[in-house]
Image (cartoon, rainbow, N blue to C red):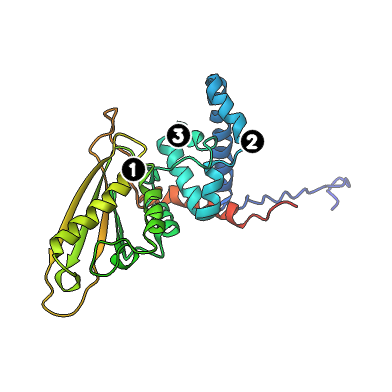
Amino acid sequence: MAGKDGGMVVIKKINVTAGAGHGGSWKVAFADFMTAMMCFFLVMWLIASNQEDRSNVAEYFSTPSVIEYEFQHYGVELTLEKLFLDLFNEPLKFFQAFITPMDHTPNIMQFGLKKVVLQHLANEIGDLAGSVEVSSDTIEFEIPQKYLFEKGTSTPAAQYAGVMTKVKGITAGLEDSTVEINSVVYTKNIIGNPKNVAEARVDLVGRDVETSFESDSVDLTKKHLVEKLEKGTKEDFVRFTIKQKASTSDGKAPKKIQESVFGGRNADATIYQDFVDRVSKAKPKK
């Protein structure tokens, strides 16, 4: 366009485009930041550790660790939930899991998450247990009589040893807990004196379970119950109840079993879920 004096007038138009919303990209960045922080604290811990701990780290590279075991048996999502819970609550214990050998006897009461506890129980006794209950400080399950004793007697069944091996795998690593074993019998099912049969059953099971304890901080109690049935039939069973003590041996409050990692904090849960999704859906590198 020409001006009045005949000169050229240049009009420059500047288009300003507002940046698009960040969406969920900040969550990905936050997850990467958390991963970097994990690595940083791990390095700091190694620098301050003694020779024994460093030897354990060296052993990690030749021995499968607890983390690898958990990924194999619980899957990606449950293992990540457990790791996040340990990281937020007990960072040093979280790092210790990376160097603990796979053959370490786990303490099921320290698994932290109810879903992980249930998955572990399913792996160990899922084909045996008739009833399973898990609360913040208690694990309870029942084994039907047919897997333990000949019908109507206290004579061990053919599969007794195998079943008790699985049960002892759960009780072996316990610490600061009480294990209660309760033999429940119904009079219609018993040959002879029901009370004597119930006592003999709980004594045998109790002795086997007690031999599995690796910690002196675990106590055993034994009970028996004889019930009459007015009608119908019910199968005898042995109930196992594992309950945390009010405090640990060093006077601290015990770690409780939680329903989820973040409870009701939805924002934190969203960040975590995004991280889990990324790891779960990631394709292995060839």
Q: Which of marks 3 and 1 precedes in the sequence?
A: 3
Q: Position of residue 225 (x, y in %)?
A: 15, 60
Label 2: state its secondary structure: loop
Inter-mark Cα distance, 1 to 2: 33 Å
Up/down of 177 relative to 269, above or below = above
Residue holding disc 1: 211
Q: Amino acid at mark 2?
A: Phe
Q: Are marks 1 and 2 in contact (CB under 8 Å)?
A: no
**Disc 1 crowd, CA 10 A, few/some/many (<14, 14-19, 20+):** few
Residue holding disc 2: 61
Inter-mark Cα distance, 3 to 2: 19 Å
Tell me what residue is drawn at x 38 percent, y 42 percent.
110
**Disc 3 crowd, CA 10 A, few/some/many (<14, 14-19, 20+):** few
Q: Position of residue 119 (x, y in %)?
A: 43, 57
Taking depth in this image into account, of 6 and 31 the one nearest to the observer is 31
Residue holding disc 3: 93
Question: In the rendered image, which quarter is residue 145 located in?
Answer: bottom left
Taking depth in this image into account, of 197 and 100 the one nearest to the observer is 197
